[in-house]
Every structure is written in structure tokens, then in C-alpha cells.
Image (cartoon, rainbow, N blue to C red):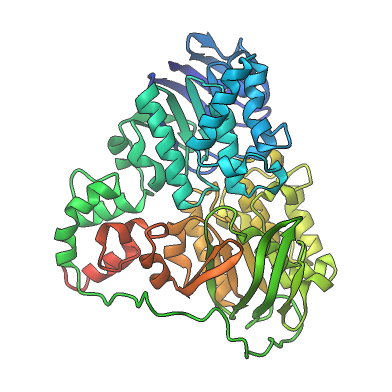
Amino acid sequence: MIRFERVTMTYGTASRPVLRDVSLEIEEGVLCVVAGPTGSGKSTLLGAINGLVPHFTGGRLDGRVLVDGRETRTHAPRELADVVGYVGQDPVAGFVTDRVEEELAYVMEQLAVPPAAMRKRVEETLDLLGIADLRDRPMRTLSGGQQQRVAIGAALTAHPRILVLDEPTSALDPTAAEDVLSAITRLVHDLGLTVVLAEHRLERVIGFADLVVRVRSDGQVLAGPPGEVLAGMDRVPAVIELGRLAGWQPVPLSVRDARRRAPELRRRLPERAAPLHDRAAPLIDRAAPLPAGPGTGATADTSLTARGISVTYGDVVAVRSVDLVLAPGTITALMGRNGSGKSSLLWAIQGSGPRRDGTVSVAGVDPATLDPAGARRAVGLVPQTPSDLLYLDSVEAECRQADRESAAEPGTCRTLLDRLVAGIPGEQHPRDLSEGQRLALVLAIQLTASPGVILLDEPTRGLDYAAKTNLGAIIRALAAEGRPVLLSTHDVEFVATVAERVIVMAEGELVADGPAAEILTASPAFAPQVTRILAPDPWLTVAEVASALEPAGVR
């Protein structure tokens, strides 16, 4: 179905190819997961399948890519649209209509599908992806996760034989991600659809994979069964890491497989007191005074108090009278299903977003009343779509501008960027970066201002395991300086490693608030892999398990 024959791809004046001598075959009816470090060339490999590479990206492609017998170098993407459905990292960039139902029908209109068949396919897709309630919604009112599902649906309505997905679950909450992956798996098993998807959150997808293609940083590719390919990778999902720690052979790839071996490991672990799930944690001490401090900016022991925050978009209430206190030096995770109001709350706190009611105080000042430079020093926000904050023509120019605007030492922004994702060429255009690289760049720009409070909206989206480890270290360092950090995320594995407190939103309200161990182990939806494997014992991470085994010498 898909064949790469000695493919080498080089962009513009780049000193080395992004893909090097790739020979690969993906058979019909296979679910193939493409893995590799941030910026390694995964998106390039996917784009070569439907002809986006090189027709729209430019560059030189040597070798051949054959899709259903058609060579992509001589067939433009429009000539492959009946065979290949494609959803990129940024679904918004691919939308062409204003309403959800119109977007689902658009590709079929281009392929001249009869109206009766179009209506039937739209209804099937709405039900398949659980987005029937979004049918009449304007595209601009959707959350990032809702946009992701609509984009996948728009690709599916054309009934392609191959579906190519770049980070399809990155903006989805755990339940929505499972629903989408289950739907995709049904299409593979029942209809013989070939699915090729790139994903950094391997813990979500590896259990469904028939084939794994590993793209290395040097552009070379290794393909094979999931167990064989992952065995050669240092950074792997928690289920595999736990299997290695426990000495299980073969190493399990899914929670289900690991659960069968869990009793033996639980017997080796010391008893651990379960969190008090029935203990109600107060959302806020309403009698607490507003914080006072020496102005805004990167001062130690900065706190944030928000009272009565409400956000509306027309008749839609996104945030309902939320009260929130972020104590100095704390790391809090904001979780909840797609569309629950997390991003709206972050923007309202930062001061740039709409706020119908409520007040925010950072060191005694509301960020909404400050000029842009002052607001940036008070509260730094990294949005879901980091490209919105990038406007210059090179990474180097963005970093220099960040240093100037923040009155920071030259090179400060670049140093922060290299700590997150090393090796990004300074001359590269920000729009040519991968999603994870762009996010790292914007995070570095925001941190250059040394804000007193840090807000991160889906900060691990597009980041590989190594970059997440570096991000976690930076977040802990920021908290150690006395800054509160609030991160909105669906990445439960990352939350388990960095967050002390977890807040859950639903329908614009805060519905749970407490220590991370309590919230994560109490919820099947938000439980990390280690918790699911070792339940009912309340372990969160592999590091905790390893630490518990070492003193007893039973590792």
C-alpha cells in the first residue's frame, strides 16, 4: 500500500537531510505508529505519503514514494485525495469553512460525492467521533481538542484507504483520546483502513500498533514489531519502563498485559497508605487576604489570587465564577475534558482574554490593567497554539527580540531554548519548526521575561520524552524560585511526575481540587499507567516504584 524506496529528503540549504536513505513498506490494513525525537523528521515522513513533501514544502526528494501504485513526486496531493486522508499537527490551518457540519462535508464536495451519500457519511462520522453536539457550532468557538476531532472527521468522511495523522491525540483529553483511537482501530480491523500516525505520547497508542517506525535524529529509520523497535529506545512509555524495572520478559506494551503480572510486583513492594479520596478539599479560603508583594515580575514568593472569574462567548458560558489561589512555589495541574473551560480560564487570569466578571491579583496588581510589558513580567502564558506569538523570520531573530523586550542578558532566550530542545538552527524559520519545537521556542520567549507567575496551556504537546524531562526540570526550578506554575494539560503521565496539586474543571466550574496523588488515583480517566497497573496500591510513577524497591534490595 505504501512503499518508500531509498528516500532521502533535504530542505533548502540544510547541511544534512532530514530523512536519509529510507526504505520502508507499510501493508494494507496496518496501524503504523511513527516515533522519534522532536524535530527528527516524523512530519516529513508523513507528508511524503500524501505528496505535501516535496510539492508544498519544497526541498529535494531523492528516491521514490509509492502510494497505491502512484508515485507521490509526480502526483500532487489533490491527485491522491481519494486514497489518502491527512490531518496535520495544527488542525486549524486546514479548516476552510465556518461550521462543523460544513467542514465534514467539504472534502466530499471536492470529490463529487452524491448528496445522499454525503449526508449519511456526515452522520456516521459525527457518531463515530462523539461530536454530534458540535454539528452547528462555529469553528472558532471550539476548543483545541474539539477542533482535533473535527479535523479527523473531515478526513474520514472521504472514506480514504489510508489515513495519515500527525499527533492526533495531542490536544485530546484521556477519554476523548481513547474514543478516537478505538474508532480508528475499528476502521483498521473492520474495514482494512491503513493508518499511519505520529505520536509522542506512545503510552496512548503503542498498544494498538501493528508496526512501529522509529525515525532517528540522523534521519535513518528502523521499522518492525512494536516490541522489537521499542527495545532499542531509551525513553519509553511508563508501562515498558515498569516492565524493564520488574524484569518482565517480554516487556508488556499495554496496561492490560502488565496487569496480568502486577500481583507478583505488588508483593515485592512495601505497603503504601491510600490517599483519602472522600476528603473534600476546599477550592479556596475565601477569607484569605489578597497577596501583597513588591510589585510585579520575577520576585520570590509571588502568589496569585483569582476571585469570581467568569468568561462568556455570546450565549456560551465558558467559565463560571471560579475562585482560585496559587501559592508561591507550587506546581498545579489544571485538567478536565475538552471544552471544559481550561484555556478560557488561563487567558482570563493572564489578562489578555475576555473576562465578564471577577478580579485577579498578582502581587497586588491585576495583570489586565498593565501594559503588555508589565503584564508579561507579571504572568507569562504559553498558549495552545504557540505560533500565534511568533512573527519574525528566524529562530535567532525571535530569541534576540525576546532578550531585548525583556531587558535580559543577550543569549538568555537561546539558552532556555537549548535546555528544552537542543540543536534547532538559528536561521530556521519558526513556521518550519515542528509543533514541539515551536512550543519550546515560545516557552523560552515567555520565560525570558522572568514572569512572577507561569501559565502553560498544553505545554507537552509535540514534545518527546527527553524534552518533557527537561521541561519538568525547568518547571521545578521556576517553582523553587517562588513562582507558582499552573499548567493546563491532558498529559496525565507528565502531571504525575511534576504536579503537587490537581484541579479538575467541568462545564466551566472547578469540581475537584486536592493533592495530585488523591485526584489522580481516584479517577480512572486521569490515572497514569503505573496507577492502573498496580491498583489498588496508590503508586503514581516508575521512579516511586524503583525507590521503594531499592532499600529492600529486591530490585
Q: Is residue 484 left or right of residue 207?
A: right
Q: Is residue 155 visible?
A: yes
Which quadrant of the view contains residue 28?
top left
Residue at left 58%, top 15%?
A: 80
Which quadrant of the view contains residue 132?
top right
Q: Is residue 386 left or right of residue 261?
A: right
Residue at left 18%, top 51%?
A: 260
Image location of residue 178, percent across then percent down: 42, 45
Q: Is residue 59 visible?
A: no
In the depicted structure, whether residue 55 falls above or below residue 432: above
Q: Is residue 266 left or right of residue 283?
A: left
Image location of residue 183, percent across then percent down: 43, 35
Which quadrant of the view contains residue 216?
top left
Query: Among all residues in the image, which is located at the extreme right?
Result: 371
Count of picture labels: 0
235 and 378: which is toward the camera:
378
Position of the N terminus by quadrant: top left
Residue at left 55%, top 24%?
A: 120
In the depicted structure, whether residue 5 falls above or below residue 424: above
Image location of residue 455, percent across then percent down: 64, 65
Position of the C terminus by quadrant: bottom left
In the depicted structure, whether residue 74 falls above or below residue 53: above
Image location of residue 548, percent across then percent down: 25, 70
Query: Among all residues in the image, which is located at the extreme front?
Result: 116
208 and 269: which is toward the camera:
208
